[in-house]
Amino acid sequence: MPLNPHCPLCSGKIELKERDFEYVVCPHCEVSFAGFELFDSLPDLESSGRILPFGVLASKELKLDTMRKLLKNMELLFELVASGQAQGIAISEEHLTAYLISLIEGQWQELEGKMPGSWALVPHDKIDKNLHDEFIHFPTYLAVGTLAFALHEMPWLTGEVPTLKRSLQRGLDFATHRGLAGRGYQWLEWRQRIFSIFERGKVLDLLLEQPDISPRMCFVLGYIHQRTAEILTRTEGPIEYETRGPVSRDIYERIARQTAAFEHFCIDEHVSLA
């Protein structure tokens, strides 16, 4: 392994000592990468170039373009994992294992602000609240979907990553904080995006089979079903509920179907969302 590798994002040269490979900060794009050593030893994916380990912005200046590149990488990796390929690209088990470990090592810890368990791309106090959905919560949903799919569909692979389940538990608990919705009038649009990730990432299937992974999330899903059913019952035709205009009933009916199996979790008095 070279002692002076190049940044997987900007290709700038990184001068390191060997002991620093596991977790590095590029001095050029100012992104901190987790699990760097594993990725640096892997070949590029055929026809796609290099995929990135999980990284967070480490600069004092807010760089939205850099953060969107990191987010796009997470979306690509989720597509690669959930569908087996994306944009004609396939991912090897070696690359996938490296990325899973990168997510686990890059997850925010208990002593790192108010985001323990998340995969925020920047500390919450460095960005406007209007950007929290995009750069704090959305990457967390993508990471949760990626880990859940791997755990549910690839037990032969995830058995070699013993901390994966605990990381997923912490991520699921963090993901409950916004009630699986966005801010303001966009709450329903975000809920649809989240449920798309959860469905494709086998999050819902995994929770039904192993609800002990996150009783909090099971409770929230049950509550969402309860509230959605109430809205459907009292309204006929298109629904206008804290949105900018009427919304097709089909959207609410789809959410009700997706959460129906969690209805009984909503009456669990032992679950606290505090």
Image (spheres, rainbow, N blue to C red):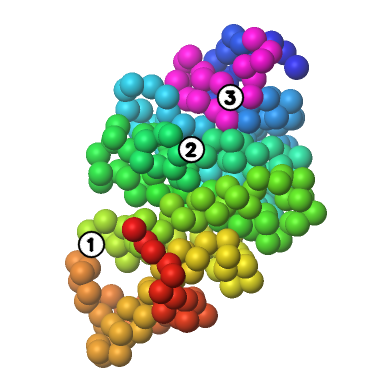
The residue labelled by disc 1 is 185
Horizontal and vertical percent for residue 234? 25, 89
Three-letter residue code for mark 2: Gln
Indicate which disc residue 23 carries.
3
| Residue 88 at least partly seen | no
Asked if the residues shown at circle 2 and circle 1 are in contact, with their CB atoms under 8 angstroms apart, the answer is no
The outermost residue toward the front is 270
Give the residue at the far right of this rendering. 156
**Viewer-side label of 3, 1:** 3
- Is 40 on the left or on the right of 126, as rendered? right
Where residue 104 sits: x, y (%)?
A: 59, 41
Q: What residue type is labelled 3?
A: Tyr
Q: Quick one: label 2 or label 3, which is nearer the N terminus?
A: 3
Q: Are marks 2 and 3 in contact (CB under 8 Å)?
A: no
Tag 3 secondary structure: strand
Q: Tell me, for residue 232, which label it has, or none.
A: none
Q: Position of residue 127 (x, y in %)?
A: 28, 36
Query: Pointer 3: residues within 10 angstroms few (<14), some, or many (20+)?
Result: some
Task: Report the span colored magenta.
Answer: 17-34
CA separation in Å, label 2 and label 1: 31 Å
Mark 2, residues whose alpha carbon is within 10 Å: few (<14), some, or many (≥20)? some
Q: Which residue is at a point 62% across and 16% down the rendered structure image?
A: 20
Instruction: Name the residue tied to disc 2.
Output: 109
- Mark 2 or 1, nearer chain start: 2
Residue 167 placement (x, y as % from top left): 58, 47
In which image quadrant can residue 213 be found?
bottom right
Q: Residue at x 43, y 28 (%)?
A: 57
Of the numbered discs 3 and 1, the one sitting upstream in the chain is: 3
User: Is residue 117 found inside the magenta-colored segment of the image?
Assistant: no
Between residues 74 and 228, which one lies in front from this camera angle? 228
